[in-house]
Image (cartoon, rainbow, N blue to C red):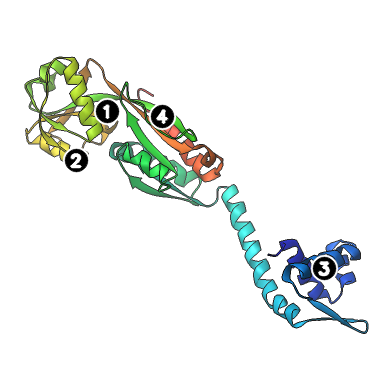
Amino acid sequence: MFDSRHIRTFHEVVASGSYSAAARALGYTQPAITQQMKALERAVGTPLFTRIGRTMQLTEAGRSLAGHADSILGSLSAAEAQLKAYARLSTGRVRVCGFPSANVALVPEALSGLAASHPGIQVELLEGEPPESLHRLQRGECDITLAFTYPGLREEVPEEVDEVRLLEDQLTVLLPTGHPLARRRAVHLADLAEERWIAGCPRCRANLLHECAELGFVPDIRFATDDNLVVQSLVAQGLGVAMMPALVLPSLALTRVCGRALQPAARRHISAYVYRDHLRIPATAVVLDELRRVASNRVGC
């Protein structure tokens, strides 16, 4: 309803007591002040000033608007300051949705770097396996989502969503430390044909079935969980072996399990997804840059 410039001019007219004094204070001509006040009166639909002789006085509507002008201009100033803070990256909030192993191995290091360089940016960390994590992005529940795919699988995302490739993650096999194959540096997947298996999320399970089918066997899947710590506990108890991304090997919590490279080598692709327009938001862009930086330091990037 109001033009903020007109409110500022109105405030100065009231404070200085005349159009001419307001013009001198603001560096305008008096006709420019007059035109702005006429435009403001048209916007509110009623006169704001009246003249009694050579004296200009506020109407009842003018007195009402004058009572609000300070708070209006104060709110505008606060909004301008906050928007400048967003642009300077001194504040902002970014919602990141990651799958469990990324939230363990990639995101914390990125957030540590972000806290050092841009302490005013707040990150809300969410969790979701793909493709649900992509759906959360499309529903507006997060600003950046992390997802992984396997060879031959491509994410179906809207045209306005950009994929930012982060790294390729080597797949390994998780074994109990007492397993006969644990003495090897690498294990051939075919040598595990008679083992009991612990499967991960539906996407990881599908890849396990595919990799095994390529070698002519069907894995005996006894358990399924997307919780990496649960997988480790089951393996440590000798209840099965598991295909595990190398990304999480440095954070293995149990000493009775070990990870060994798989032959033939298998990898998954890890990417960040973000709406193209959101790349123009400084806080979102800097969080993405931190994720890129951390990923570039990983083997296989």
Of badges 1 and 4, the one in the foreground is: 4
Residue named by callout 3: 38
Residue named by callout 2: 229
Closer to us: 187 or 132: 132
Q: Which mark is residue 166?
A: 4
Mark nearer the N terminus (1 vs 4): 4
Tell me if label 1 and label 3 are in contact, CB under 8 Å: no
Left or right: residue 264 versus residue 106 is left
Left or right: residue 210 versus residue 296 is left
In the image, what residue type sits under mark 3?
A: Lys
Between the residue at mark 4 and the residue at mark 2, the CA separation in whole angstroms equals: 24 Å
Tell me if label 4 and label 3 are in contact, CB under 8 Å: no
Mark nearer the N terminus (1 vs 3): 3
Callout 3: SS: helix
Of badges 2 and 3, the one in the foreground is: 3
In the image, what residue type sits under mark 1?
A: Ala
Q: Which mark is residue 246?
A: 1
Mark nearer the N terminus (4 vs 2): 4
